[in-house]
Image: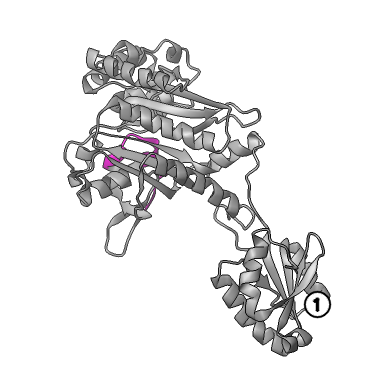
Amino acid sequence: MAIKAPRGTVDILPGDAEKWQFVESKIKEVCDRYHFNEIRTPLFEHTEVFQRGVGDTTDIVQKEMYTFEDRGGRSLTLRPEGTASVVRAFVQNKLFGNPNQPVKLYYFAQMFRYERPQKGRMRQLNQFGVEVLGSDDPAVDAEVIDLAMSCYQSLGLKSLKLVINSLGDKESRENHRRALVEHFTPHKEELCGDCQSRLEKNPLRVLDCKKDRDHPAMATAPSILDYLNRESEDYFNQVKSYLTAMGIEYEVDKNLVRGLDYYNHTAFEIMSEAEGFGAITTLAGGGRYNGLVEELDGPSTPGIGFGMGLERLLMALEAENIEMPIDHQLDCFLVAVGAEAEKESVRILHELRNSGIQIDKDYQKRKMKAQFKAADRNAAKFVLVLGEDELQKGVINVKSMETGEQAELPLTELTGRLQKILKGGNISE
C-alpha cells in the first residue's frame, strides 16, 4: 500500500505555494497599515486551554479536537482555533502590562479539527486571525470588521456579504437564554441529540445547529435583539454607525450566534456570494469576547477578534476568476560546458546570487541543447553560456530569451552589467 497524506490534509506544492505567499503578503500589508503586530503560538497547548477558553459545550471541544497524552501523563491538544492560544499567551507573558493598549495582534497558523473533510474544510486547515485585547470601545469592533473586509478587498474580491448581530452583555444573554429554553422545551424531543443537550447547557447554540435549522421552531425562536438591555443596544448601535460612516454595507442577522461559547456583544461573519462558490459560503467570522481573559486566569480585559480560513479565501479568488500576479520567470540560467567551466560556474552563481540576481543552472550533466531547454522550462529571461573558449577570453555569453539578442560580457564586469540589463538596460551596451 502506497503511503499517502492523512485524510483531511493536503500538500501545497510549488506553483500553488506562491499563491499562498502572495495572499499572506497582501494580508500582512493590511495589518501593517492598521498597526497590528504578529504573534506566533505553539502548535499544541494544554487541553485545558481549549476546554476553558473555547467552551465545554462546543462541537470543537466535544467532537473535533486532536487530544493526546504525552509521556509525562499531561493532556495536550493540537490547537483547533487561534483565540484561546493568543489569550493564553497574552496572560502568561503579561501583555496586559504593555503601556501601548489595546494590544493588537495577528497570526497565521495551522489548526486541526477532526471533522468530515470536504472542499474548503480540511482536518488540517490554515487560518489568518486577529485579536485586539484591552479595549471595549465599539470603534474597535468596527475597526476589526473593517480590517477583515480590507484584506479581501485588497485581493480584489467583490462578491462579499457582511452580516452582524449582537449577543448582548451577560444580563441580556441570561434573559434571552431563559426565553430560548421556554421556547424550545415543548419541542425538545423533536430536536437532534446535540440540541437536546445544548438546550440545558447553552441554548443559544441551538440556533447554530445545522441539523435542525429547518425545524419550524427555529423560525419563531426569540431574537436576542428583543432582549438587549439599554447598554447593549447602545453598543450595537454605535458599531453600526461606525460601519456606516466607513461606507461598509452590512445586514443584521438575528440568528447569527457563532459556534464558540466566549462571544458577547458584536458577532459577525463575512460570506462569499460568488456564483459557484458552494453551499458553505462563510469566509470569516468573529466577534467580541469580554470575559475570556478572566476565564484563562488573567485580569478583566475586553477582547475582540476573528478567524479567516485561507483555503476558503483561495477558493473565493478562484470563484471570482481573480488572477494573482505570480512571477514564475527566472532572471538567468547558466549553461556551463566543460570541466573548467563547471568549476567556474560555482563561483559565478555565488557572486550573482549574493548581488540579488535570481539564477540557476543544470545539475544533471546534460548536453548544451538540453540545458537550453531547461532554461526555457524555467522561463529564464537570459541564458549565460560559459565554455572553454569563453574562459580563455575571460568573457561569458549573455543571450536574451525574448529577443534572441546576445553579447559577450567580461567576467570581471558581469555582476554590474547584468544588474543594469535586468533593470531594462541594453544587452550590448
Q: Residue at x 35, y 33 (%)?
A: 260
What percent of the width, then of the height, locates residue 143? 37, 31
- Of 194 and 325, nearer the camera is 325
Q: Residues within 10 Å of mark 1 (few under 14, many from 20)?
A: some
Query: Image quadrant of residue 301?
Result: top left
Q: Residue at x 34, y 25 (%)?
A: 266
Q: Quadrant of the C terminus?
A: bottom right
Q: Quadrant of the N terminus?
A: bottom right
- Of 304 and 45, nearer the camera is 304
- Of 393 and 158, nearer the camera is 393
Task: Tell me the SS state at disc 1.
Answer: helix
Q: Is residue 166 left or right of residue 123?
A: left
Q: Is residue 122 left or right of residue 46?
A: right
Q: Is residue 328 magenta?
A: no
Q: How many marks?
A: 1
What percent of the width, then of the height, locates residue 172? 25, 18
Q: Is residue 14 left or right of residue 429?
A: left
Figure check: 191 above or below 422: above
Residue pushed farthest front?
A: 429
Amino acid at dot 1: Met
Query: Image quadrant of residue 259?
Result: top left
Figure check: 326 above or below 1: above
Q: Is residue 60 magenta?
A: yes
Magenta stretch bounds: 52-67
Query: Image quadrant of residue 300?
Result: top left
What percent of the width, then of the height, locates residue 83? 34, 42
Q: Which residue was labeled with disc 1?
A: 368
- One can see residue 196 in this view: no
Figure check: 259 above or below 311: above
- One can see residue 126 in this view: yes
